[in-house]
Amino acid sequence: ETVLTQSPGTLSLSPGEGATLSCRASQSVSSSYLAWYQQKPGQSPSLLIYATSSRATGIPDRFSGSGSGTDFTLTITRLEPEDFAVYYCLQYATLPKTFGQGTKVEIK
Amino acid sequence: QVQLQESGPGLVEPSGTLILTCAVSGDSVSSRNWWWSWVRQPPGKGLEWVGEVYYDGRSNYNPSLRGRVTISLDKSKNHLSLKLASATGADTAVYYCARDPIAGRETFDYWGQGAPVTVSS
C-alpha cells in the first residue's frame, strides 16, 4: 500500500497570502495518478487537480499542482475566503487507492 | 447533470451488516466509462477508499476491510450498493459514493452528499 503523508497538518494564513501544501508518498507514484481534493465543513470532497497538475473543470488558476516521484505540491496563490478548507491528496496509480491525512488551511 | 444520492439506515448494531445504496441520476451505472466507488470518512478524520465496481461486475476492495465488504450494481434501478459485514464502532463514518472515469486521468469527479452511519447498540 502506498502511504501518503501530508504536511503541514494545519496552515494558518491570511486572505491574500499564498499557501504551499506538501504530499509525500512512501513509494514512487506515477504523476499521471496523483490528485488533490478540497473539502469544506459538512460537504463532500471536490476535485481540484488531477494527474498532478491538471485543473478540474471550473477550478481557478490560483490553484496549481506540481511534483513527481514521491513529492507533490499543491500551491494556492492569493488565498480567497472560500479557499479556507481541508485539502487531501490521493494516489490512484495502485490499489488500494489511498488518501493523505489532510492539511487544514485556516484563517489566521 | 450527474447526481449521486446515498441512502440507508443511520444506525447499525455491532456485528450487524451495514447496507447502503447510491442512486445515480444523469448517468448510467451500465456505462463502460466509469468505475463506481465508495469512500468513507470517520468523524473528524480523513478519507478512506472502500472499494469500487465496474459495469460488468468486476470489483476491487481495500484489503483493510478484510473481506467484509461487497459492492454491487443494480442496473434496473441504476444504483450501486455497499454491504459491510460484522460492523464495529470503527466502521462509524460518513459514506460517500463517487464516480471514477475510465478514460483520461480524472478521478472521483462526482460525489454524493454522504450518508452518516453510526455503529452502536
Image: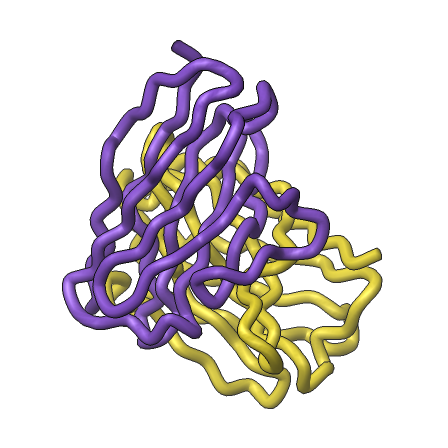
Q: Is residue A60 above or below residue B109?
A: above
Residue A98: quarter of image: bottom left
Q: Residue furthest left?
A: A26
In what quadrant of the picture does the N terminus of chain A appear? bottom left
The purple one among the chains is A
Residue A69: quarter of image: bottom left
Residue B30: quarter of image: bottom right
Q: Residue furthest bottom?
A: B56
Q: Is residue B8 above or below residue B60?
A: above
State the residue at coordinates (72%, 82%): B31
Residue nearer the viewer, B103 or B37: B103
Q: Is residue B121 visible?
A: no
State the residue at coordinates (37%, 31%): B43
State the residue at coordinates (33%, 75%): A30
Residue nearer the viewer, B86 or B76: B76
| Position of residue B52 in the picture relative to residue B101 (left or right) | left
In what quadrant of the picture does the C terminus of chain A appear? top left
Q: Position of residue B69 (x, y in %)?
A: 38, 66
Q: Is residue B49 above or below residue A104?
A: below
Q: Is residue B90 visible?
A: yes
| Position of residue B19 in the picture relative to residue A93 (left or right) | right
